Image (tube, helix red, strand yellow):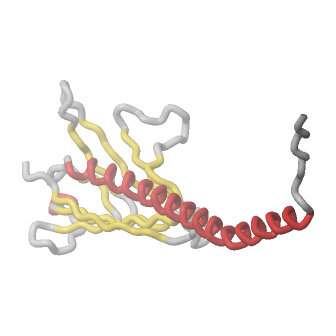
């Protein structure tokens, strides 16, 4: 009759060697993993910040793109107010205001707001829809037909705005400048 093979385990030396090899691999791999996580966080933050900047800029451009000469009612370097006619079914005139709450103490904590008088888009008293937060600056410039700066609302043919937004995680500021021509109707 045959004897069963003896059950044999690992020796202490073999266990120590395996643990040492695993430790070396962890030590070598940790900087790579940490660097990858930091890069992922930075990339994600950049994507979120640029999306906030793009959304606010596109929304402002959409409102301005529908304007005709003479529809601007008030304009300044930091706010812009105009009347716009909607084309859905019935013609309703609405006053649209694009303005900002200024950043406090030089920090980039301002907001860009968009408000309509009709229909009232303020479901809660004192609330205005926010296009973006972490805003550093929003500046408007107005140009006439020849491309010269104008301060007369009736002469405005192009509106240029510069919007700067700060990243919450990295603290880097991103800005976008856009110039839009008004409709010739």
Outermost residue to the left: 185
Res 54 quadrant in image: bottom left
Image point 28% across, 54% down: which residue?
61
Res 155 quadrant in image: bottom left
Image point 21% across, 73% down: which residue?
149
**66 and 43: which is toward the camera:** 43
**157 and 62: which is toward the camera:** 62
Image point 66% across, 68% down: which residue?
29
Residue 144 visible? The answer is yes
Residue 3 in the figure: left or right of residue 71: right
Residue 19 in the figure: left or right of residue 148: right
Q: Residue 153 placed where, x, y %?
A: 22, 60
Residue 77 visible? The answer is no
Q: Residue 36 placed where, x, y %?
A: 58, 65
Q: Residue 59 placed where, x, y %?
A: 33, 49
**10 and 170: which is toward the camera:** 10
Image point 40% across, 44% down: which residue?
115
Outermost residue to the front: 1
Residue 12 in the figure: left or right of residue 103: right
Residue 33 vs 117, above or below: the answer is below
Tally of marks: 0
Quarter containing the N terminus: top right
Q: Residue 41 placed where, x, y %?
A: 57, 61
């Amino acid at each position: 009759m045959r004897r069963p093979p003896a059950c044999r385990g690992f020796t202490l030396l073999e266990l120590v060697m395996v643990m040492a090899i695993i430790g070396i691999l962890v030590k070598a791999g940790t900087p790579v993993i940490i660097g990858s996580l930091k890069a992922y966080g930075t990339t994600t933050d950049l994507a979120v910040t640029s999306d906030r900047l793009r959304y606010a800029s596109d929304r402002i451009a959409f409102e301005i793109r529908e304007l005709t000469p003479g529809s601007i009612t008030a304009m300044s370097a930091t706010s812009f107010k105009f009347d716009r006619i909607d084309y859905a079914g019935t013609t309703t005139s609405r006053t649209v205001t694009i303005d900002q709450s200024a950043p406090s103490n030089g920090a980039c904590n301002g907001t860009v707001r968009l408000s309509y008088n009709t229909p009232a888009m303020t479901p809660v008293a004192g609330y205005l829809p926010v296009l973006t937060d972490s805003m550093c600056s929003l500046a408007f410039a107005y140009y006439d037909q020849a491309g010269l700066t104008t301060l007369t609302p009736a002469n405005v043919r192009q509106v240029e705005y510069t919007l700067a937004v700060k990243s919450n995680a990295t603290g880097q500021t991103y800005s976008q400048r856009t110039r839009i021509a008004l409709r010739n109707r």
